[in-house]
Image (cartoon, grey):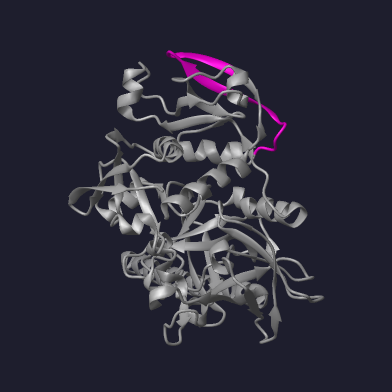
Amino acid sequence: MRRNLVLCLALLFWGFTTLYADISAEKLAEQLSGEFAKVAEEVSPAVVSIVSVKIIQAPAGGTMPFEEPFFDDLKRFFGDDFFKFFTPSPRKGRKYQQRGLGSGVIVSPDGVILTNNHVVGEADKIKVTLYDGREFKAEVKGKDPKTDLAVIKIKGKNLPYARLGDSDKIKVGEIVLAIGNPFGLKSTVTQGIISAKGRSDVGIATYENFIQTDAAINPGNSGGPLVNLKGEVIGINTAIFTRSGGYMGVGFAIPINMAKSVMKQLMEKGRVIRGWLGVVIQPLTEELAESFGIKGKKGVLIGDVMKGSPAAKAGLKRGDIIIKFAGKKVDTPSALQEKVASTAPGTRVKIDILRKGRPLTLSVKIAEMPKERAEAREKKVEEELGMRVGELTPELASKLGYEGEKGVLVLEVFPGSIAELAGLARGDLIKEINDKKIDNLEDYRRIIGKLLKSKAPIRLLVKRGEYTFFTVIKVE
């Protein structure tokens, strides 16, 4: 009898606890759902649709630009980013409109909008549509292709705007919402988590420190906000990893702290001023680490030091391994590059290195990056050869079947150029120039620069898919 009573009481207790647990779980789900709805309701009015328009003139021969490799290096990530083309009959001299669609987020009541550089690009006209349907013409206040950020502005007062958070405080696993206009579908909200942070070497921008998320991001989401459950913008949605052109569970957002820094400079100066160290750097592979007698160590290897640079003045040498920059560990070239670039010129910082296995700390005064000269040289090379190249990152090598290869990747070939006449095409890998191996972009620039000055024929060893071939570019 007593035994049965105990059993009954136990069953009754189990029933109450199970019912209470079910009620608690249901309430928790309702509360979480309510938080999602609250954040979406708060932030959505600040998210805008951006339509960019560029006027294009059809070239001789009737070849239209949409048949050429515009942004093809980005399409692998953006899935075409919902570019729409309205093209009349392709007659020489005929003008037509190239349209692009993306998103943006208002960050101040007077109409300052953060978006991606690839959304506004070289647009002749930009139209912004607000959540409530109002339309505005927008003015570009500044663009920064190296981070793929842009700031535009519309004329208005007391406009809805989003609060900016602190991306340094985010944690992997944290719940986030992505808001934007995928495929032109206004004010779409998707939910996910932060899958990873500090992603670099993705091959999208020069300076990469991406937040990775599985919140669904699709073509048209670019430029929209990634938001935490406090309703704060913690990132600007930039790209997707895709093989189909659509969502595959991996998206990338620019950390809002990086965006805030870039936005401030664009608004105040119209350009971004970056720090410069003056070293040629490369990853410290396991094999290289062993050869330097520092097995198990992480850092960035200095391949060369530029004459007269801050690095040279501070005493850095070829073969030094940078372990820390300004007290923070650096494991990859992109991490070091981002930290140096974000350091204000004139700032003196400490750099911890290993030299022949021995630790050493040096003090260096960061200078301003001489980007005007570098960009002018790069543009001249592009114009003379008629093609644009970029680094072969591990991610791009994997996607294109170039694993284990070295060289530079052809990103774009301009119509009617000598590069096109030589048979080069986007996706080609340049492995050698006049029998000299090309390991990276620095090699390519150095060798091409000398050959262009001498006007000598340029013989390239090119890999396309599984095959390699030679071709010659003749510079007049």
* Nearer-the-camera pick, 103 or 303: 303
In the image, residue 244 above or below residue 399: below
Q: Residue furthest right?
A: 157
* Nearer-the-camera pick, 47 or 152: 152
In the image, what residue occupies the spot 41% across and 72% down?
A: 12
Query: Where does the image place residue 116, in percent across and percent down from the top left?
Result: 57, 63
Q: Is residue 471 left or right of residue 348?
A: left
In the image, what residue occupies the spot 39% across and 56% down?
A: 411
Query: Where does the image place residue 255, in percent across and percent down from the top left?
Result: 58, 54
Q: Is residue 17 left or right of residue 146?
A: left
Q: Residue furthest front?
A: 476
Q: Looking at the image, can residue 102 be seen?
A: yes
Q: Is residue 140 left or right of residue 374?
A: right
In the image, residue 306 above or below residue 455: above
Q: Quadrant of residue 195?
A: bottom left
Q: Looking at the image, can residue 208 be seen?
A: no
In the image, residue 50 above or below residue 465: below
Q: Is residue 47 left or right of residue 199?
A: right
Residue 188 among magenta residues = no
> Which image quarter holds the N terminus?
bottom left
Query: Where does the image place residue 363, in percent across and percent down from the top left?
Result: 64, 20
Query: Where does the image place residue 147, in percent across and percent down from the top left?
Result: 56, 53
In the image, what residue occupies the spot 46% across and 77% down?
A: 58
Q: Main secondary structure of the magenta part?
A: strand
In the image, which residues are magenta? 343-361
In the image, residue 325 above or below residue 337: above
